């Protein structure tokens, strides 16, 4: 173990000094010497590094350190629009990328689908940096691995626990955008991706329970672990996995459902976030179950949910995964209502899509790396708190099921009909929590499910969640998104059991 630690420390410390954070000026200067004369150009420079530590069943798994560095070039000229990308950040590499973009520019002029000359351009310079109070380097590599080993031991409470795992990842990115108009934007991001899980088995029954931020992430330093109850919830996670193995199956009924914030994250993501992406609405994006039941004429009048439904695009919550000052097209990011009092107000669409659709959107054009163009994406999409405490939400239910932590999802290609399953269920009868039930599932139709929103939790149940693994586009782009929500009650939902 000591030898392995020395090898890992050597690898990580040497890499740590190489990639972050760059002074891009010499690359920008080289680019300006080779860029051709065009009406408009932009240069987006990206550096990204992800380090992951992982212990499973007390065994250290191969740690990983993934680094990426490159440039994305965009041109607009005489009615054409084109881009290219390169990881060769010397003068010749940039020259070659410019020549490739010029070839595409000529093709684009002959086959233009949009009026490129009228597309909006970035108009403001600025910067952003994640607030980090306890940096990743504050804990030694030995400390981090020791904590993951401690969690594995804490999960090992019974012979029926057949799998135990704990992970801790850090990602950091620097994104710099400069344009021929003199705009300069520099943004630096730090993300923390923690979590652990236990799998219990008895006979033919197997159940998994996760915690500590498993499947989620936050922006910030090691101080964000406390928000995920990492590592303090480890023993509870194992106890619940064991209890679920012996719990009865979730009953089948049409009843009330109380969704906790960890499940609201998935509900918001799939049945509000993706259907409101403007490129889906325009018909451009069809990958990954991808059109939308939403149409342009719905904005301003369509009742998406009950009057209790208020959903915002909010890039200003510091610890949320997709907080930023500018999107990847260079549009300043500001908090906006997407749905207010149940009425649909605006889509998730960047400046280019907004121009095409003649519809106001938000600053949500995002790219996953230097080798991808910005497309319409979710960012921080939050359901605003209501007025009910969690106890009041429970008391309002005569018969129903509390559901926590998503474990399965399915949705149709218009993002309308869905079916979701959760790790943990708990019966509610006559306003009181009863015993656990396993394999809780529910299904519905987005167009009516949100109209059955009957109660929204207050700030006391409001939690910040997010995922680093939202995929979209072809070729695929995997980006981080944030979702914050209180617990919520929905009436007349079809619930059922079954793995």
Image (spheres, grey):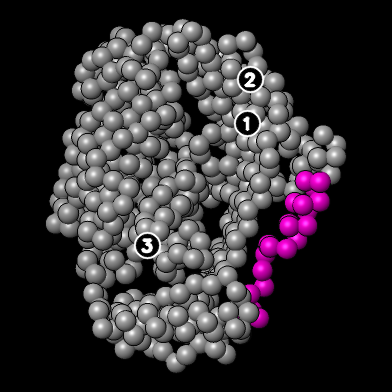
Secondary structure beneath label 1: strand
Magenta-colored stretch includes residue 349: no
Relative image position of residue 202 (x, y in whole percent) = 51, 9
| Mark 3 → mark 2, Cα distance in angstroms | 41 Å
| Mark 3 → mark 1, Cα distance in angstroms | 33 Å
Disc on res. 166: 1
Quadrant where the C terminus lies? top left
Query: What segment is highlighted magenta in the picture?
Result: 7-28
Neighbours of disc 1 within 10 Å: few (<14), some (14-19), many (20+): many
Relative image position of residue 164 (x, y in whole percent) = 61, 24
Neighbours of disc 2 within 10 Å: few (<14), some (14-19), many (20+): many
Question: Would residue 332 be found to the left or right of residue 370 on screen?
Answer: left
- Residue positioned 42% across, 29% down in the render: 407
Quadrant where the N terminus lies? top right
- Residue positioned 25% across, 79% down in the render: 111
| N-terminal label among 3 and 1 | 1
Above or below residue 209? Residue 29 is: below
- Residue denoted by label 2: 155
- Residue denoted by label 3: 375
């Amino acid at each position: 173990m000591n030898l392995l630690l020395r090898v890992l420390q050597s690898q990580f410390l040497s890499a740590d000094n190489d990639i972050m954070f760059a002074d891009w000026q010499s690359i920008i200067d080289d680019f300006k010497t080779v860029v051709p004369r065009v009406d408009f150009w932009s240069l987006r420079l990206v550096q990204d590094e992800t380090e992951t530590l992982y212990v499973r069943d007390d065994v250290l798994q191969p740690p990983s350190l993934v680094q990426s560095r490159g440039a994305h070039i965009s041109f607009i000229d005489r009615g054409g629009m084109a881009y290219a990308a390169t990881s060769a950040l010397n003068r010749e590499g940039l020259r070659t990328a410019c020549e490739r973009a010029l070839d595409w520019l000529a093709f684009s002029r002959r086959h233009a689908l949009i009026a490129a000359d009228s597309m909006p351009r970035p108009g403001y310079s600025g910067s952003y940096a994640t607030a980090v109070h306890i940096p990743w380097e504050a804990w030694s590599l030995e400390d981090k691995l020791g904590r993951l080993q401690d969690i594995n031991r804490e999960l090992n409470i019974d012979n029926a626990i057949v799998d135990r795992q704990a992970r801790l990842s850090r990602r950091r990115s620097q994104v710099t955008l400069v344009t021929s108009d003199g705009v300069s934007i520099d943004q630096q991001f730090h993300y923390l991706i923690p979590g652990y899980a236990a799998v219990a088995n008895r006979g033919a029954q197997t159940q998994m329970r996760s915690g500590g931020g498993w499947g989620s992430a936050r922006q910030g330093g090691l101080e964000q672990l406390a928000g995920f109850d990492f590592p303090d919830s480890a023993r509870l996670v194992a106890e619940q996995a064991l209890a679920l193995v012996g719990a009865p199956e979730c009953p089948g009924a049409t009843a009330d459902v109380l969704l906790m914030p960890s499940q609201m994250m998935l509900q918001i993501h799939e049945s509000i976030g993706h259907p409101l992406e403007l490129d889906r609405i325009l018909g451009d994006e069809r990958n990954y179950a991808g059109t939308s039941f939403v149409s342009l004429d719905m904005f301003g009048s369509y009742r998406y949910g009950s009057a209790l439904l208020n959903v915002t695009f909010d890039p200003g919550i510091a610890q949320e995964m997709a907080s930023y000052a500018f999107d990847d097209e260079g549009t300043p990011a500001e908090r906006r209502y997407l749905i207010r009092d149940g009425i649909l107000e605006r889509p998730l669409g960047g400046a280019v899509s907004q121009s095409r659709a003649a519809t106001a959107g938000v600053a949500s054009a995002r790219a996953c790396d230097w080798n991808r163009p910005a497309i319409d994406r979710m960012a921080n999409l939050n359901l605003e708190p209501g007025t009910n405490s969690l106890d009041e939400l429970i008391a309002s239910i005569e018969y129903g099921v509390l559901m926590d932590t998503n474990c399965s999802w399915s949705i149709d290609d218009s993002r309308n009909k869905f079916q979701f399953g959760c790790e943990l269920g708990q019966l509610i009868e006559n306003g009181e929590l009863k015993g656990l039930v396993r394999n809780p599932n529910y299904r519905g139709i987005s167009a009516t499910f949100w109209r059955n929103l009957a109660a929204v939790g207050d700030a006391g149940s409001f939690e910040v969640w997010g995922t680093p693994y939202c995929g979209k586009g072809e070729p695929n782009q995997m980006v981080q998104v944030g979702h914050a929500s209180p617990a919520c009650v929905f009436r007349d939902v079809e619930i059922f059991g079954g793995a």
